[in-house]
Amino acid sequence: MDAWIEDLSTKLQQAHDKEAVFAQILEAARDVGFDHCAYGVRLPLPIASPRFLLINNYPVPWRERYAAAGYLATDPTVAHGRRTQNPLVWSDAVFADTPELWDGAHSFGLSVGWSQSSFDANGVMGMFSLARSGEAITARELEAKELRMRYLACVAHHMLSRTLSSSSERAPEIFLTKREIEILKWLADGKSSREISDILHIAFDTVNFHVKNVIAKFGTPNKTAAVVRAVLMGLVD
């Protein structure tokens, strides 16, 4: 194992709250040449107004401006992270449609950056970013450092997604049987209980029995809402 990764892993095991975890990740970020780092997590529930929780060492005035201007909704790095987990190097082209955001970031020394998103089985999305005001990120630098940068994104999501949100804020852990998952998939495809009964060669009442169990497990008012939650939580692929 890379000695740098092994050392960071040991330090993170000794960190017991989000501030201590973030301090170790920030120290590691500085080791790979970045002055700032940030991690944000998007909780999948409630669906109508999902919560976003953030931790970073960006300048306080920039954090306040970012929040006040509602930049989270237009930030192209966040939009990219929702579509793909491929890393993104910040550039003029990336921020072409959000010049005010880009100019503001520059004014606070956040002119060079790299971001990568992560997703877990509970439908939680995380976004990790590294930033600095110095030299642009070159292909040579990425070749030398991106393994460690990706590792930081991974451990940030693993450690901070849990410590940023309490158990009451996260979606509850739900266990579905193989048959329940099978039925949910067919429901997601728009099939009725009668159609699923024919497809799976099981009794109509048996299908409804499993549907009722699924609704109870998710605590939803109907099967449509249960399907939506199952998909958001990554339980139905």
Image (cartoon, rainbow, N blue to C red):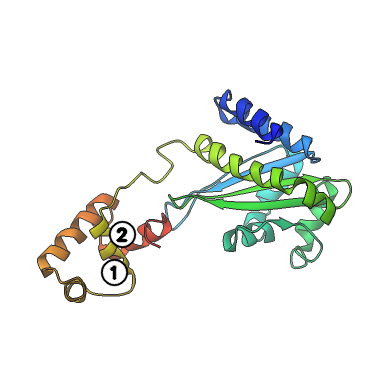
Picture residue at 40% right of the left edge, 46% below the top: 171
Provide residue 220's location: percent of width, then percent of height: 28, 55
Question: Is tag 1's residue or tag 2's residue first in the polypeptide sequence?
Answer: 1
Q: How many C-alpha atoms fall within 10 Å of the one at disc 1: few (<14), some, or many (≥20)? A: some
Instruction: Look at the picture and state if 49 lies above or below 31.
Output: below
Provide residue 236's location: percent of width, then percent of height: 37, 60
Res. 64 in view: no
Q: Which residue lies furthest to the front in this view?
A: 1
Q: Distance between the residues labelled 1 and 2?
A: 10 Å
Where disc 1 sits, the SS reads: helix
**Residue placed under numbered mark 2 in the picture:** 226
**Residue placed under numbered mark 1 in the picture:** 187
Q: Quick one: 148 or 133, which is closer to the camera? A: 148
Instruction: Look at the picture and state if 190 lies above or below 205.
Output: below
Instruction: Look at the picture and state if 22 lies above or below 216.
Output: above
Q: How many C-alpha atoms fall within 10 Å of the one at disc 2: few (<14), some, or many (≥20)? A: many
Picture residue at 55% right of the left edge, 46% below the top: 41
Confirm or deny contact between disc 1 and disc 2 (CB under 8 A): yes
Where disc 2 sits, the SS reads: helix
Instruction: Look at the picture and state if 51 lies above or below 181.
Output: above
Q: In which quarter of the image is the N terminus?
A: top right
Horizontal placement of 158 versus 153: left or right? left
Identify residue type, mark 1. Answer: Leu
Res. 86 in view: yes
Horizontal placement of 53 versus 180: left or right? right
Mark drawn on residue 28? none
* Front label number (1 vs 2): 1
Q: In which quarter of the image is the C terminus?
A: bottom left
Picture residue at 70% right of the left edge, 42% below the top: 148
Picture residue at 75% right of the left edge, 57% below the top: 89
